[in-house]
Structure formats: C-alpha cells, structure tokens
Image: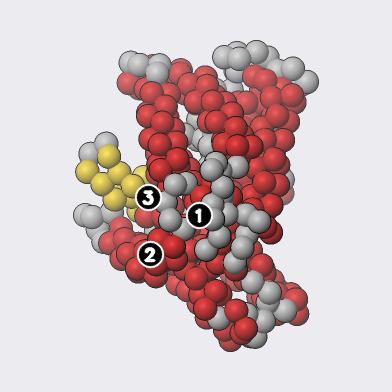
Amino acid sequence: MPKPRKAPDVVIIAVILMLLTIGVVMVYSASATYSLEKFGDSFFYAKRQMFFAVLGVFLMLFVSRLNPDLFYQWAKPGLFFCFFLLVLVLIPGVGMVRGGARSWLGIGAFSIQPSEFMKLAVILFLARYFMLNAREAQTFVKGLVIPLSVAGAAFALIMLQPDLGTGTVLLGTAMVLIFSAGLRIRYLVGLSMIGIVGFAGLVLAAPYRIKRITAFLDPWQDALGSGYQVIQSLFAIGPGGLMGLGLGMSRQKHLYLPEPHTDFIFSILAEELGFLGGGTAIVLFAVLIWRGFRVAILSPNLFMGLVAAGVTGMIVIQAVINIGVVTGAFPVTGITLPFLSYGGSSLTLTLVAVGILLNLSRYTE
C-alpha cells in the first residue's frame, strides 16, 4: 500500500459541501408549505435534512481516514449482511411500507432502507472479486456470469419490494464495474440486448409501469392520472427561464407537484433559480464525476480503482436518471437526486460512499 497524502481531494469536498448547501435550502423551499399544513412546522423536513447532512459529512470525513484495507476485508461479510437485511425487510410486520413499497426497516421515526446499503455492498464485493480474479475478468463466466449473478440476486430481492428505481441503479453500477474490470465488448453488447428485453418484461408485468411508459411518451393522454407528475414538473421548469422566479417563489410546490422535496426537487430548483441554478447543479455533478473517475484512473491497484469507478458510476447514474425523469426524457422511476433530495438513508449512504472515494484519493499516484 503506498503512503497516503496528508489530505483527500479538496475539490470533491468543496463540490459535496456546495451540493449539500443547495440541497438543504431547496428542501426547505420545496417542503415548507406541505410541512406547515401537515406538521405545523415549515422547517420539519429541512431540519431533518440538515441533521442527516451533518451526520453524513461526519461519517464521510471519518471514513476518509480509515485504512482502505478495511473496505477489502469487510466487502464479503458486508454483502451477506445486506442480503440478510433485504430478506428481512420483505417479512410482513417487519418491513415498513412507504409509497407502496416494503423497503424500510425501523422503529417509529427512525428507519433505514437496506436497498441503499446494498448498492455500496455490491460495489465493494465486485471490486474485491475482480481483484482476486483479474486474469479471468475478460472471460464469459468469471467476467460476466458470476458477478452479474450476485448483482441479479440483489436486484431480484429489491424488485420484490418493489423498487425498480433503486434496482436499476444497482444493476447499472454493477455494469460500470464489469466494464471497468475489462470484460470483452461483445459480451457487453449481448448483455445489453438481454437487458432491454428483460426491462421490457418487467414493465409489461406490472400495469402501473406500463402507465408510466405511456405517460412518458405522451403525458397529455392522461393529464390528471399517469401523466400528471411529468406535466406539473414541466410546468415548474418552463416558467423558470434563465434566472428563475426567485428563491421561495415556486408555484408548483403549493401542492400541485407531488414529491417536490424528494424525486422532483430539481423541478423546484429550476423553477426558482432558473437555467442558471439548474445548470450550476449539473456542473457541480460533472466536476464530481470528473474527479471521481480521475481517482479511479490514478489508483495504485485494481481494487481501489474499481471502488472509485463504482462509487462515481452510482452517483452519475442516479443523477442522470433523476434529471431525465423531471425533464420528461425518461419514464418516472422514483429515484432521488443525490445530495439534493430529502432522504435520510440515501443521503447518509451516499456521503459514506463519497468518504470512501475521498479515502482512495489520498493514495492516487
């Protein structure tokens, strides 16, 4: 193991702090009306977002100082533990149902979402697996079938909740790792074709997913039903123009746009801060992606490089899908925007993942 530098990548830290600041401000702005009506406190969600942001930053900095050998050693038991949690959450009376999905474990107000932890567990496990099987990474069985079977098993358990959005991010992240490990292109092309067919099968298996696809193609066919979210999102983004309506001046957040502080927070950001505000957030994500893949390329060994690529890939996939959904480019999937959307488990887990990325940045050559 090479000697670490004194400090992790300060550009990544600066970008994360800026995204978190934007996130806390926008969560308050987007949720104030709903929070006041439901809880009598306009700061209800903002205070919780601030708590998880502070907790996440603390954990991020703590993880950034750990010995990276720990990530390698705990990759396998961590995966098994996350599989146990995914099975546990499916048991009636144990898993908590929210938004139609049995995705949560907890007591009262405190809860965790095991599928979020599984995303990081798969990254660490596959990075360890490819480190141990580097010579066979281009072969069909060890380079594709075995790692994809691990990710596929996790995906299947997540789909039983069901949570297609998180499952899609997990599979996409696994493919980033498989590609980065050196799998032959012809296998990836064939897998992509199978993936398209499989995705179509999942859509056809559930009527509500079919409605989401038709709403994506033409939301005006059912403007008050399946197309409602997309239309209201576009009604938010359109009037924002270049400079926006002004911070706190959104119209769609007044109970017109569902989930304005979670899945569709980018819509409120674009409405209030305009193209400049939305563009700034996208630029910050682009800088984070650049620095993340830079860490992956400059890492001293395969394990560290794949972990960095996996963490960066997970963030970029989730951000691209979320922004694509709110702008009408993708069907609605229920994926939050990293660092900006309200959510305790998602925010904390993502900051822990960034902490691992910062840790690895201290060892780049």
Q: CA distance from mark 3 to mark 1?
A: 10 Å
The residue singled out by tag 3 in the image is 113
Instruction: Indicate which disc residue 78 carries.
Output: none
Q: Is 96 located above or below residue 18 in the figure?
A: below
Q: How busy is the neighbourhood of tag 1: few (under 14 within 10 Å), some, or many (20 plus)?
A: many
Q: Position of residue 79 (x, y in %)?
A: 39, 66
**Hey, which quadrant is residue 280 in on the image?**
top right
Residue lying at 39% horizontally and 67% vertically, measured from the top left: 73
What's the amino acid at mark 3? Gln
Name the residue at the right extreme.
Answer: 242
Q: CA distance from mark 1 to mark 2?
A: 23 Å
Query: Which amino acid type is shown beneath numbered disc 1?
Result: Thr
Callout 3: 10 Å neighbours few (<14), some, many (20+)?
many
In the displayed structure image, the side of residue 241 where residue 292 appears, left or right: left
Identify the residue under disc 2. Answer: 74
Residue in the foreground of this view, choosing between 163 and 82: 82
Please provide percent x and percent y for residue 98. Answer: 36, 45
User: 338 or 260, which lies in front?
Assistant: 338
Q: Which residue is painted at 44% across and 62% down in the image?
A: 69
Q: Are marks 3 and 1 in contact (CB under 8 Å)?
A: no
Precedes in sequence: disc 3 or disc 1: 3
Q: Which mark is residue 166?
A: 1
Residue under the point 45% across and 40% down: 61
